[in-house]
Amino acid sequence: MAGEKIALLIASVTVIVLSWSNILKLVDDWNSLPSYSHGFLVPFVAILLVYLDKKQLTRIQDQPSLWGIVFISAGVICLLIGTWSGLDFIRQISILFLISGIIAGYWGLRTLKALRFPVLYLLFMIPLPFIVFNSIAFPLQILAAEGASNILNGIQIPVFREGTIIHLPHISLGVEEACSGIQSLVSLLAISVLMKKLGHLEGVTGVLFALSAIPIAILANMMRIAGTGILGSFVNPHLAEGFFHLFSGWVVFLFAFLTLFLEIKAIQLLRKRRPLETV
């Protein structure tokens, strides 16, 4: 096995060198794409999850596996295909294969299985392909504009909507891609999945909790747009832009996070009163 480890070490170093530009591109995406600014935190969260499981990992009886070479080979193939085709998502997804290969090659498949959550969690740091991202963002823009209009109509404020444009008595709001809610949705989904893991929610209960971040993020964004319209139209138009617009985004995101927190606390409280079956 010593020879296999040396070969894997050489392969790993070579791959890291070849992937360096890929890593720099990923960091640039985190810096330039607001929807993935949380990407800076994802690797540290993954490392923290590994640290929290260190006692369990030390109990695993494992041995290096040749599957490490297979995973690394798959990572190199993704890296080459992504580089030649210009598809950044395929190129960046190679990182997961390479990490899996190093874990399987040095420690073994049982260790890789135990670490599957931290490894897969790294998916949250990889931006979706633009065609997929845009196919999600535009419907969210329409949904956010329609939902905010319904909220305003519900509180007897006259509003007229044209696509993603909301016309109020003294101001018109354009629900741009940045206001579609996809930024908070991606970040909140990453948080809900992490809370599911740390809260030990399994089966259907865990899946439903994680997915609940989607309607929570959408509803919170509708409320933000409606609130912005009210302040901008009846208080001060400047409150609909600049610092106040950005600040309202943080306030609503905090509200969404607290909603998730209260939700998981409620689930845990119900479990104490009546244990749920693990599905």
Image (spheres, grey):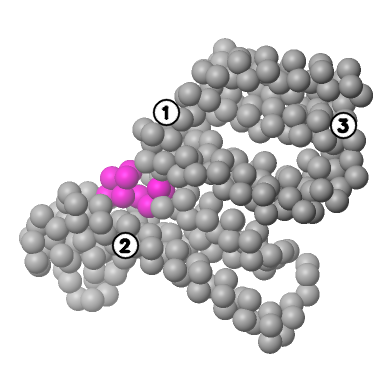
Q: Give percent across and percent down for residue 66.
A: 87, 26
Q: Give percent across and percent down for residue 170.
A: 7, 60
At label 3, the amino acid type is: Pro
Q: Identify the residue at horizontal 57%, vertical 12% (top origin).
A: 84
Magenta-colored span = 175-183
Badge 3 local density, few (<14 within 10 Å), some, or many (20+)? Answer: many
At label 1, the amino acid type is: Asp
Q: Which mark is residue 64?
A: 3
Badge 2 local density, few (<14 within 10 Å), some, or many (20+)? Answer: few
Report the number of numbered marks.
3
Q: Give percent across and percent down for residue 1.
A: 92, 24
Q: Quadrant of residue 44?
A: top right
Where does label 2 land, which residue? 251
Q: Nearer the viewer, mark 1 or mark 3?
A: 3
Q: Name above or below for residue 62 compared with residue 70.
A: below
Real-space CA distance between mark 1 and mark 3, rounded to the nearest whole angstrom: 34 Å
* Residue 181 appears in the rendering: yes
| Camera-side residue of 32 and 88 | 32
| Camera-side residue of 270 and 146 | 270
Q: Identify the residue at horizontal 49%, vertical 58% (top origin).
A: 214
Where does label 1 land, which residue? 28
Q: Quadrant of residue 195?
A: bottom right
In the image, 101: left or right of 244?
right
Q: Identify the residue at horizontal 21%, vertical 61% (top origin).
A: 228
Q: Secondary structure at mark 1?
A: helix
In the image, 28: left or right of 148?
right
| Camera-side residue of 8 and 179 | 8
* Residue 136 appears in the rendering: no
- Residue that lies at the very extreme toward the bottom in this rendered image: 273
238 drawn magenta: no
Task: Pick whichever of labels 2 and 1 is earlier in the sequence.
Answer: 1
